[in-house]
Amino acid sequence: MRKILKKTATLMMTAVIGVSMSCPKMIVYAGQRMQMQERYTTPKEWNYTEITAYQFESTDKFEDYLQTGGTHLYNDKFQEKDHMVKITVADSGYFTIATQTDGNRSQKINLYDSTKEKVLAQTTSDGDLEYGRLAKAGEVFYLQMPEKIDKIFVTTGVIKDGFGSMKASDTYYESGTGSTTYHPFSIKKRSAVEFNISAIDRNSEITYAHIERKRTMEKNR
C-alpha cells in the first residue's frame, strides 16, 4: 500500500512540474506598450475542507482512482480556520490515508478521530504521515494541516475487506477469521504462478497459503 501511495504522489508532482514548464508567462500587446501578464487561479479541486474516503475492490482500482483525480493537493491558499480537513469513510473496509510533503519535515500533520482525539499514526523518515485500519461506514477522521503550507498531497481510500476470485498483478485485503478461506484463480496455459502474502499487523501470527488444483469429477462416478 505504501508503494502505491508514494508512486501516485510522485506521478502527480511530475504532472504539475510538466504543466508549469509548458505554460510560461503570456506576453500581451496593448498599443505601443508591452506588458508581462501572469494570472494565477486556484483550481476548485484543491484545498478541500471535506474529503470522502471511497471503497475499492482492490489496490489496482484504488490506484486508478488516485491517478485520475483522487489525490488531493493543499497549498498556502488553504484558509480553514482550525486548519482541519474532515474525512468521512463511505463504506466499511480497510481505511488508509497518507500525506506527502516533499520531505519538508517542518510541515507537521496530525490525524484525529471523530472525537478529535489524536490518532497514533506512523511517520516516515521524510516526516510524512501514514495510517490504516479497519473502519466502519460513516466513521469520521480529521486531518490537521500546519499553519504554513508549502505543498501537501493527501491520498485516502478504503480497500474492501474480503474478496472472491483473484486477478493477476492485483492486491487484495482480507482480515483474518481464524479459519481457512478459498480464493479461486485460473491460468490459460502452463506457467509459473507467484503469490506474495504479508500481514499488515506486524504483531500478527504467521500468514501462509497453499495451492490446490481443482479436480473435475467424471460423470457417473
Image: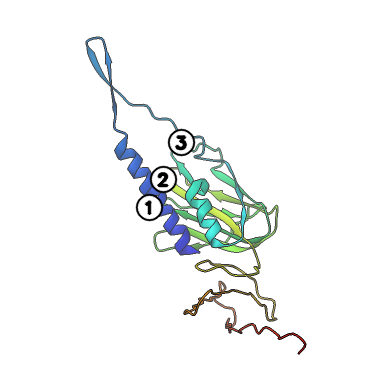
- Residue at 59% of width from left, 70% of height from top? 166
Q: Residues within 10 Å of mark 2 (few under 14, many from 20)?
A: some
Q: Give the answer, above or below, for where 86 lies relative to 30.
A: below
Q: Earlier in the sequence, mark 3 or mark 2?
A: 3
Q: Are marks 3 and 1 in contact (CB under 8 Å)?
A: no
Give the residue at mark 1.
102
Give the residue at mark 3.
77
Report how far apart the C-alphas of labels 3 and 2 lie in the structure: 10 Å
Give the residue at mark 2.
151
Q: Does residue 200 appear anywhere in the picture?
A: yes
Q: Is residue 32 left or right of residue 90?
A: left
Q: Residues within 10 Å of mark 1 (few under 14, many from 20)?
A: some
Image quadrant occupied by the C terminus: bottom right
Direction front: furthest residue: 220
Percent x, y of residue 47: 51, 40
- Residue at 70% of width from left, 55% of height from top? 137
Q: Are marks 1 and 2 in contact (CB under 8 Å)?
A: yes
Q: Residues within 10 Å of mark 3 (few under 14, many from 20)?
A: few
What amino acid type is highlighted by mark number 3?
Answer: Lys
What amino acid type is highlighted by mark number 1?
Answer: Asp
Percent x, y of residue 163: 65, 68
Percent x, y of residue 210: 58, 84
Report how far apart the C-alphas of labels 3 and 1 lie in the structure: 18 Å
Q: Earlier in the sequence, mark 3 or mark 1?
A: 3
